[in-house]
Image (spheres, rainbow, N blue to C red):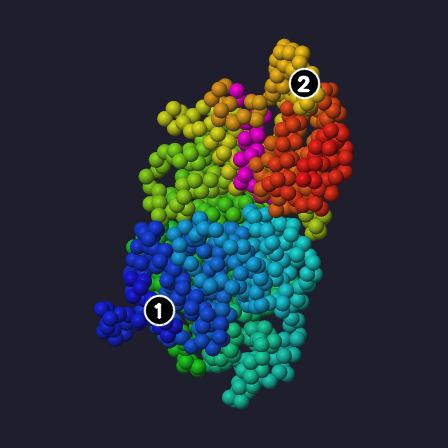
Amino acid sequence: LVYKMMLAHELGPQFQIDGRQPSVRPGITCVSPHIVDTVYRLLYNAPYSNELMMKEVLEKLRRCDKVMATGNARFSAATLRWLHTVYQLMNCRLLRFFKYYAHASHLVHHLRHSLVHVSHRQLYGSLECFALCLVNLQHDVEFLQALLDPAYHGVPLTPHPSALLRPQIRYTKPKDAWFECAMLARNAVSVISRIVHMRGLGDAPGLSLEDCLDSLAPERMPMVWAPSVLRYWPPRIRAYYASKRASRVAPVAAAAVRQLLGSAPGHAALRPTASDVSSEIESALIAFYAERPRQPLFLLAVWEALRGHSMETPDAGLLRVAALVRRVLLQFPPSQMSSHATTLVDFVLGAGTVDAESCALLDAFMFRLHLVRHEHVVFALTRGEHDLRGDTARLALARYVLLESPGFTERLSEWHRLDFQGRYWADYKQWEKQSAYLARFPEFFEYDGLLRNAEAPLDPPPAMNLPIYYENGMVRLLPVLEFALGRLIEAEDRVLLRDVLDRMGILYRLHQVPLTTLMNTLFVYFDAPPLHDAAVIRSLNLSLLDMTQQDFSPEFRAFVKNQGPSVPPEGSEYIARLMARISRAVARHLPDPLSDALPEIHYREIPNPILLVLTECVVELLTWWCLHSAAASSARLTMTPRPASEQAFRAEERSRTTRASEWPMAQMWFALAMDPPPEPRDLQVPGATHIHSTGVLANVMPDELMAFPFVHRLREIVLEEPVLQTVSGPKRYFSFVAFAREASSASSDRFARNAAGTRFAATAVFNSFEQNRIHGNANRPNTYLTLLHSILHYGGVATFAALADTIRGLVASGALCSDIQLLYLCATVGPVLYRLVEHEALYVQVLADLIAVMAQVCPKIPHLDADYSTDAVEQVMDFFCFVKDQFDPGRPAWRRIAPHIAALPASLRYQLQCIVDQ
């Protein structure tokens, strides 16, 4: 079915049957919506055999985009219809497929030139919405790599591309910016911040984050971000925008606009009451705004010209102005309309207050004249340039636009009445509901809504109408609302945030990845005071979750449905159930789902059962963290002054880390991981699975809540476990003279005593965890070592830095006293050396601290001299030999470690220096 719509070349699709062109009934110009529904259902039902199909579709899009790069592409009507159909199909039905698609991060390459050069405004609207959703979908560092890979040449066809050895990417900053649209560029910055926050950049060496951010928007569009936004961003991104020192552009003064109306050529024609408006005057106005630098002022001039004029019953003067405004606006690039809406909103807010007349006129601009799009106005109010905390005028206008605007409330009420279902694949009345909605609220893309309703002639003639299958104003609003949600949380206005979620949460039924969006929001804003309000966090969960499509715990369901207490569950029984659920998923011993009402696996948002269980558990735990933090956040909402500097941000991060380390649920989880409860016999999983699942969960949660506190427990284990405070047995260095003397004396008893004395008493600490459990030798140091390795295996640079800081703290304490403690510390970093070596400063710090520990411990070992060493010290020397052989940091790094080597005893210093010099 998709092949029948397929482009054979850039000029249009060719419908062929047995090599001949079929006869098509006159008037049929597009595919039936029921056929398009069948297409996506077939694609979802064959998830392992549709890669070839999707590759062909994406290749056609890339070829069309490449033609767009010439700037003068002229596509046929059939091509435009096909592009619009495919964009809707991918945006509204196939985004779930693209989330885990091997090349999802590079799909922006298929839209890049189209976003700049598309002149058909209806097609651009679909393209802009798809670009927003596609960027919001990104969740991996590969997206940043794609931004610096301008030589991308299309999607290679391979069933398992992740299994192939990929060549080293040569990162190159593109010559042209990715986005001309300010809304797309700002949204991309927000997504990059989330990716860096959640994933880090440690696994992409050589990637320049600064080049990624520089490539998003042209230099003429400097981005300014408010302190309330930067507060939740990673330090590197904060530092980047601090170094730019960009300043906000002051809004245009009303007096300047009135002067423009009175003196600039042709502006007298913008007043509905003007008489004797000749075509020369109108042509002068059109020519005046043909120059791009003047275009941001046009909507301001129209605003002032129409202020005070009634919009209820359009008269001849208003229709004349509407026709003239349409002719001017059709000159503007579609990609700049979000910027022009931003200029208009700042102009409206320039006086500091918004009166009822301004609100009514803005509503007319959006829903009667259709001069600005509603989603662009929402973006302009919440774009992140202004600190919304305490900005009463901007928040009041945001409330009006989202909740009180008559034009929007009518549409939202109709949306509620039609009751679009979240399981769209099972709702066979979706098209009837879409048709009913569009019949009452038709779409206008060329600023002709007032003229069409009045049946006035259109000059120039309208562009060709493209088929609408799934999109409408509400669908286009959804990705912008996702962007605005972050700004509303940062505004710390709990009442507005809750009202927006309660009223507009129904829109998230059509969201392709609502569960992932909820987890991302909770992850980034887990320490935001508004989310610590029980009513707000309940509304957030209700808005984004379809409880019939997920399998949450009874306690969480009761809280979300307001049928249970607004406090986290007490006791370890709940934690044990979560741990068992993740462990069974990791061990692939999942029982049948508790509910038979869950959708089929290929229709689920997350088809991977392990990832689905992890995501659901993270949502639950972060919700309980927000409720746990309610008391502390109430005091923080009244704090003055607000953090606005890097020092204040750092202090707040340290405070958050301190508060997170005291979270009772994390402490209970650690206790259960160290001593897991027995599993039922029919669902028994290997003992190490509980530790493995804890390591996985700790790294999909914010680091401050689990990973950092668990890593910091290393200090407690090393200093308090008795088995680590013992000294291993002596081990004599081999000497030919001593060997000959002892052999001639035949003192076999002495040989036996020496052999017995060299036995390693702490072997169980370093054995396999499973072997210890089988033989009854389980011990806390060994269990913790296994848990720590699991956390570090899935962790990032931040987790490695926490480990390095913990080891440095042990060195500074001076409390280490045994070679077993030294060997234990070496064992903690051994399995992650291959990842540490890519971060030289951190790697050198860890090695230097381990040698400092050796220098600190060796003088406290009584039988360590020129003839004798110990078993543990010799294993440590083997460890450094392995480091030098496999992960040599280089001569400059060893020079920095040299002072610590000089502090060792002579025999050890000589051995280590030989290892370094070999």
Work out how far the residue at label 1 is from the one at label 2, CA to CA, in angstroms: 88 Å
Task: Determine which of the numbered discs, if any, sits on residue 740 in the image.
Answer: 2
Which residue occupies 56% across, 73% down? 299
Instruction: Give residue 798's position: percent from left, percent from top.
Output: 61, 43
Give the residue at mark 1.
Answer: 7
Q: Assess whether mark 2 and mark 1 are in contact (beta carbons under 8 angstroms).
A: no
Which residue occupies 51% across, 64% down? 151
From the viewer's perspective, is residue 795 above or below residue 571?
below
From the viewer's perspective, is residue 290 above or below residue 103?
below
Nearest to N terminus: mark 1 or mark 2: 1
Q: In what quadrant of the picture does the C terminus appear?
A: top right
Q: Amino acid at mark 2?
A: Ala
Horizontal relation, residue 79 to residue 839: left or right: left
Residue 123's image quarter? bottom left
Residue 740's image quarter? top right
Instruction: Give residue 578's position: percent from left, percent from top.
Output: 46, 33
Q: Is residue 790 magenta?
A: yes
Bin the neighbour count of mark 2 within 10 Å (Cα to Cα): few under 14, some 14-19, many 20 and up: few
Which residue occupies 45% across, 69% down? 65
Please name whichever residue, 510 or 14, is drawn nearer the observer in this view of the structure: 14
Horizontal relation, residue 826 to residue 699: left or right: right
Instruction: Give residue 809's position: percent from left, percent from top.
Output: 70, 34
Please name whichever residue, 500 or 730, is drawn nearer the observer in this view of the structure: 730
Please name whichever residue, 252 or 120, is drawn nearer the observer in this view of the structure: 120
Q: Please tell me whether mark 2 sits on a helix, a strand or a loop.
A: helix
Horizontal relation, residue 745 to residue 372: left or right: right
Residue 301's image quarter? bottom right
Horizontal relation, residue 504 to residue 900: left or right: left
- Where does the magenta region start and end? 777-798
Q: Amino acid at mark 1?
A: Leu
Task: Determine which of the numbered discs, if any, sits on residue 368 in the image.
Answer: none
Instruction: Give residue 654's position: percent from left, percent from top.
Output: 67, 41
